[in-house]
Amino acid sequence: MGDGYDSPGPLRYPRSYTLGTGGRFRLPSLDLPPPAPYLPTFDQDFHLPPLAEPDAPQMGMPTLGVTNSAWMQQNPLYTLTTEFTSLLPFMSETTPGVGTTPGEGATFRPSLMVGVRDRLWQHGEFGVFGGFGGKLPFGAGRRTGNGILGLSLHLGPDAPEGDATRYGTGVWLTLAQAWGAEPDRDTPPPGWSFNPTGGVMVSHSWQHPDAWGADLVWGANASRWGAVNDVPVGGFLNPYVGFNYARSLGKHDTLNWEATVGLNLGLAGRYDLLPGPGVPASLALNVGLFGWQHTWGDYGFGIEPWFFAEPWSNVANSGASFYNYGGGLRLDFGAINPRRAHVDDEFGR
């Protein structure tokens, strides 16, 4: 029913009626008010506040950088966000030649990841992601590959609007299965490649809309298998802290500088044929400089020069240095899908 209506049949208010013959008995008209010009809405009856949605969609690209802000980007509720991220890093030599076995030399380790996120709540976004990559030696050696498939969850406040500086805290969670990090052995035992991987990042963010933003982050990544200075280890753990600063160049362009510092640890020890310390460990640095993001409508593109290093480690492959370094580019493209219909739309939510 609309706001105003003329009800059919028995829903009309009573009229006068004549009984018997000759009109000797007449029931007087009931003096009732006419129907209300409109019916109260669902929200008026039950006092349900509408769910606020941002006016202008804004594509966010959280997988472009090494840190994430707390804010929930200005994409409407019940929309899917699709993001394609490519990493193009070069890494210094970590497996030199030994005897008659040739070394790998420097390596190129590209990867591609696709993520789809669904904003199911005002302050929550659920996602799935998957990707694959490889290691391409410039010298002799066999090519190797890796892959990942997992789930993500982002909880955080709405991105600020207006002229005031705002503070917010958010959290990013991931849970995945990763392939390619297991020790390189000819006959692995059953389940050897099972590598559950999880991560948590807590973001403390400050932002002045259309001017600047800053993020202080901390968290950890953990997996069954991993690498310290490119040496296979078990019980991998990577705690870290980081910082990001972003500067707006206008409504659609942003530059940012970011860095993290942490530890790469192998809590279950070294998993190759060489002896090593009880807990392989190294420093871990990631730096992104002059990352650029451009958005237009529901779309976004980003590129960031990226550098990384393990400047000190207590383990190394045979004949290799107790450090490594590398760098490359991080590329990202994403889009907000058209908003889909939802049951809340029936009630003006």
Image (cartoon, rainbow, N blue to C red):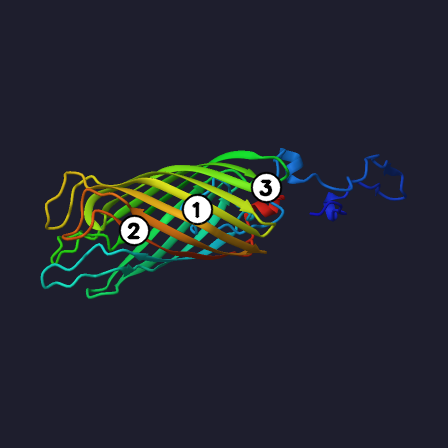
190 on left or right of 155: left
34 on left or right of 87: right
Residue 325 bears which disc, if any?
A: 2
Q: Residues within 10 Å of mark 2 (few under 14, many from 20)?
A: some
Q: Where residue 299 appears, x then y in whole percent?
A: 54, 57
> Closer to us: mark 2 or mark 3?
2
**Is mark 2 in CB contact (under 8 Å) with mark 3?**
no
Query: What residue is pinned by disc 1?
Result: 126
Between 127 and 13, the residue placed more toward the observer is 127
Between 332 and 261, the residue placed more toward the observer is 261
Q: Where residue 196 appears, x then y in whole percent?
A: 26, 47
Query: What residue is pinned by disc 3?
Result: 209
Closer to the N terminus: mark 2 or mark 3? 3
Q: Quadrant of residue 39?
A: top right
Q: Amino acid at mark 2?
A: Tyr
Quadrant for the C terminus in the image:
top right
Q: Residues within 10 Å of mark 3 (few under 14, many from 20)?
A: some
Distance between the Cα atoms at labels 2 and 3?
A: 36 Å
Q: Where residue 321 appears, x then y in whole percent?
A: 20, 50
Q: Is residue 291 above or below residue 33?
A: below
Distance between the Cα atoms at labels 2 and 1?
A: 34 Å
Closer to the N terminus: mark 2 or mark 1? 1
Q: Residues within 10 Å of mark 1 (few under 14, many from 20)?
A: some
Closer to the N terminus: mark 3 or mark 1? 1
